[in-house]
Image (cartoon, rainbow, N blue to C red):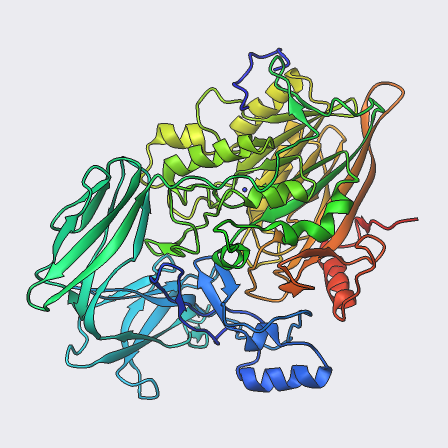
Amino acid sequence: MRRKKWAPGAICALGMVLAMLCTANGEEAETGTAQINITENAETAAQETAVEGAAAQEDAAEEIAVQDDIVEETDTQADIVEETETEAEVSEVEVPYGTKISSISDDGIEFYWKKPENVNGYEVFRCYAEDGEYELIAEYNKKSIATHLDTTFDVNQREIWYKVRSYVENEDGTRSYSEFSAAKAASYREAMKLQRETTYMPSGTTRTIQAYYGWGNVSDAVWSSDDEEVAVISDEGVITAIAKGTCTLTCASESLQTSLTSKVVVDRDAEEPLTEITSRYTQSEETGIWKNTDAKETQDAVIMMVGDMMCTGKQVRLAATDDGAYNFNDSYEYVADLISQSDFAIGNLETMLSSSWPYMNNEAYIDNKANCNAPSTYLDAVKSGGFDAVVMSNNHNCDAGENGIVETLEQVDRYQLGHTGLYEDEDDCRYLLADVNGIKVGYLSYMSIHTGFNGKDEDWEQETIDTMLNYYSEEKARADIAELRAAGAEYIIVYMHWGVKNNRSVNENQIEEAQELAELGADYIVGSHPHLLQEYDELETSDGRTVPCFYSLGDFQSSILQMAGNRDSVILRIRLTRNEDGTISLAENNYIPCYNYTEYDGHNYPVIPLNTDLNGGIETKKMNKFRKRIAETVGDKIEEYTVG
């Protein structure tokens, strides 16, 4: 149940060794490069790793697929039990990554790359043989540019290669350049091909499908639908979804003497939960407060918090079962006992759960941007891991459109998880309030204005943005914190989705927003988004309070591996207690280091605590290395939680 807003006063989110992927429905999804800590020669790196006795060289020898800001291993990888990370030097100037040929049409060849954060521009090069001489064909002096449309290529060629490098402007007027990205090839299509085998759509929406041949589109394509009560298609290939169902599109070309078919699925059903849904917390219809009615009011509460819980295309493919379901539960098995020891557990759900939209394994990219959308049974795993609630404001909120937000919220409600940060109606309550053993703890979830939603909200009406999304502003936070206090919150925790991805350094925007939140009355600030851990700090306010701030808890569960540290995370464990005067204090404040392995004992992407006392006695060769790196990143202002 989603509670509506209550009246005031009421209790009312191989760098360079890559391959092309083929998605489950047959559509091409090309990989790109990532700037990660690897050697330039993957074979040498793998040999070095073998000397060390490691099980595999994940960073250097595996293929990985870049999905906008997501990098994941391909299906061809070998099973990996131990993670190994090569500490190699990289260029001081960041290399463009995520490169791919995003389209070949009558408009030209579109070459795409993912933008590094700290560069001034790019140079694009072209060649007609992979090992030939590349020529400079375009220069962009805006780092916001991430595509080049080539309209000057030689149409008589059958393969065209592209590279890109970035540069920074030095103070003396010279430039420093990055290494080149991996080369990507555009190939002449010798036969007609359709853009997709299957198109997933919600009713009432439109999408375009194209037919390709040679260096462009099929000039005489004729489209038809075998069931126009489900979907219709125009001569230009624009599909309009009419009503729930499945139909077949046919594209015929008289000049090519060819016809091909493609399916359209409108309003695909959400998956059924794998088990009966139960929850230790339920929401009061009268007050909207979440409470464990079986718990005693001890006035002492252990709360655990984690960072980003993501579900990429690789994770979806590996979770597929023989009966057509998706089971992700093994990813959370090794943390379930630990997290269930908390009195309340919460994390950042960073994926959409929209069944009518393509899942990430169906289409990794849509319009050159990551499509982070997963089956709803990912929540079975979240629940099995011991979580009671999720925060939801993150940069993938718009990936499945407005309808995707509605469907995602429906599933989170279906699984009886408390939530905040993403909304359907303007009168939805903008916070989460939980009674944890007699202590009322409030949660807020915001998106930093400096991070945003990957530009996907640019065409949305402002009213829709204000209603469904949750950009941070000082004015909004002031009002939300005041409303939470009026509703009875005694301790307020604010999640911020902020920072620069793949950057351990806290930036000025984060520091400014954190200090604002502390001054406004937040009691604890927790961050997510950078795909890396960031430091813990303690902020002093003008009224003499000390406010803890953990700038990033890291990716808790994900296949992402762009650089060393992407799989590091922590479980933040705090204990609140009521003092004799009735006030609430932070009695314990510690972290539990974790690592998200690719595979362990048949489990895909399991999160494993790096303390054998807390993980059932599991030991891995690199455990101490990961644990040390986490401690160095977090800093010495907070201690690791240990037993005894």
Q: Quadrant of residue 135?
A: bottom left
The front one of 577 and 66 is 66
Q: In the image as oriented, which residue stretches furthest toward the front?
A: 323
The front one of 534 and 47 is 47
Q: Quadrant of residue 302?
A: top right
Residue 601 in view: yes
In the picture, the quarter occupied by the N terminus is top right
Q: Is residue 566 above or below residue 551?
A: below
Residue appearing at x 66%, y 49% in the figure: 553
Q: Position of residue 293 (x, y in %)?
A: 74, 22
Q: Is residue 140 above or below residue 322?
A: below
Image-based side of 111 in relation to 609, left or right: left
Q: Quadrant of residue 136?
A: bottom left
Image-based side of 357 in relation to 552, left or right: left
Image-based side of 248 in relation to 94, left or right: left
Q: Position of residue 570 (x, y in %)?
A: 71, 51
Q: Position of residue 299 (x, y in %)?
A: 83, 24
